[in-house]
Image (tube, helix red, strand yellow):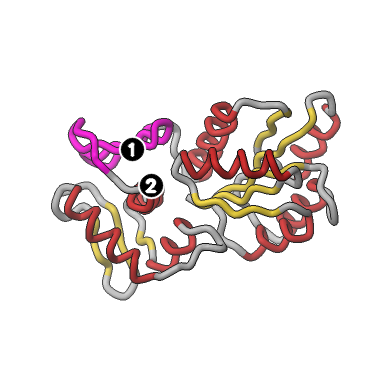
């Protein structure tokens, strides 16, 4: 899953990016409102973390422009603790949740997981597809209770397929959602990750839909 982090304070931005990458996300960074608006409007991000006090264009304006353009990804806004009016303005502009600074990374990750789950129609932090379980809190996958050993990119591919299980996911979708914008993307590596996952999952769980992509489905 791919997250856009919009924060103009360099240290906090780096802390957010490091925490998100460690939790299994691909991360794009923007440090001003103009870049944030462009990236959120043109890149297929799964969620955005948006500071409101930004140079170039304030966060509320960025959010309003995203929503006016039909961009529906979940947005978690960051606010100063005592600015309740910013929270109200953010929610009214289309934000899905807010978090006051300073905050604990664990709380931000929990809120982000919840937003992504709700956007995909999932109620639980544990996603299931037959014998395969994905605990989004621990970034851990199991088959029949046995833990799978996954690389970070294998986990990202599996997590995206799990969030969209029983749907056809194209190779382009996978490339766009498991890599950050500045990563040297190679669509051929997706086939490598799929091949590795097939060896670790029950036979037939990852189906190839010719000319369209892949589908994760419960084994027959």
Q: Which mark is residue 193?
A: none
The relative height of residue 100 versus residue 163 in the rendered view (above or below) is above
All told, the count of numbered labels is 2
Is-magenta flag for residue 204?
Answer: no
The relative height of residue 11 versus residue 84 in the rendered view (above or below) is below
Q: Which mark is residue 159?
A: 2
* 79 on left or right of 128: right
The image position of residue 156, as x and y in percent, is 39, 50
Give the extent of the magenta segment.
Answer: 126-149
Q: Can you tell which quarter of the image residue 45 is in? A: bottom right
Pointer 2 with pointer 1, Cβ within 8 A: yes
The image position of residue 153, as x and y in percent, is 37, 53
Residue at horizontal 24 percent and vertical 40 percent from the top: 148
Classify mark 1: helix, strand or loop.
Answer: strand
Classify mark 2: helix, strand or loop.
Answer: helix
Mark 1 highlights which residue? Answer: 134
The relative height of residue 90 versus residue 196 in the rendered view (above or below) is above
Q: Nearer the viewer, residue 171 or 101?
A: 101
Residue at horizontal 69 percent and vertical 30 percent from the top: 99
Return the disc, 2 or 1, that comes first in the chain's sequence. 1
Q: Residues within 10 Å of mark 1 (few under 14, many from 20)?
A: many
Q: Can you tell which quarter of the image residue 51 is in? A: top right
Residue at horizontal 73 percent and vertical 29 percent from the top: 101
Residue at horizontal 53 percent and vertical 58 percent from the top: 180
The image position of residue 35, as x and y in percent, is 73, 60
Is-magenta flag for residue 145?
Answer: yes
């Amino acid at each position: 899953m791919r997250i856009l982090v919009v924060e103009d304070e360099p240290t906090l931005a780096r802390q957010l990016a490091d925490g998100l990458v460690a939790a299994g996300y691909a991360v794009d960074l923007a440090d001003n409102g103009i870049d944030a608006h462009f990236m959120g409007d043109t890149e297929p991000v799964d969620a955005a973390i948006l500071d409101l006090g930004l140079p170039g264009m304030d966060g509320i304006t960025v959010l309003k422009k995203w929503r006016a353009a039909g961009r529906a990804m979940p947005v978690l806004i960051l606010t100063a603790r005592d600015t309740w009016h910013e929270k109200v303005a953010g929610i009214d502009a289309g934000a899905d949740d807010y978090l006051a600074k300073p905050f604990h990374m664990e709380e931000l990750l929990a809120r982000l997981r919840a937003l992504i789950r709700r956007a995909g129609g999932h109620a639980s932090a544990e996603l299931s597809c037959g014998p395969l379980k994905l605990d989004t809190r621990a970034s851990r996958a199991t088959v029949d209770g046995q833990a799978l050993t996954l690389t970070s990119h294998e986990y990202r591919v599996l997590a995206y397929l799990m969030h969209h299980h029983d749907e056809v996911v194209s190779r382009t979708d996978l490339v766009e959602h498991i890599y950050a914008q500045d990563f040297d993307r190679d669509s051929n590596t997706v086939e490598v990750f799929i091949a590795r996952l097939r060896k670790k999952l029950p036979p037939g769980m990852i189906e190839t839909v010719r000319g369209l992509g892949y589908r994760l489905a419960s084994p027959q």
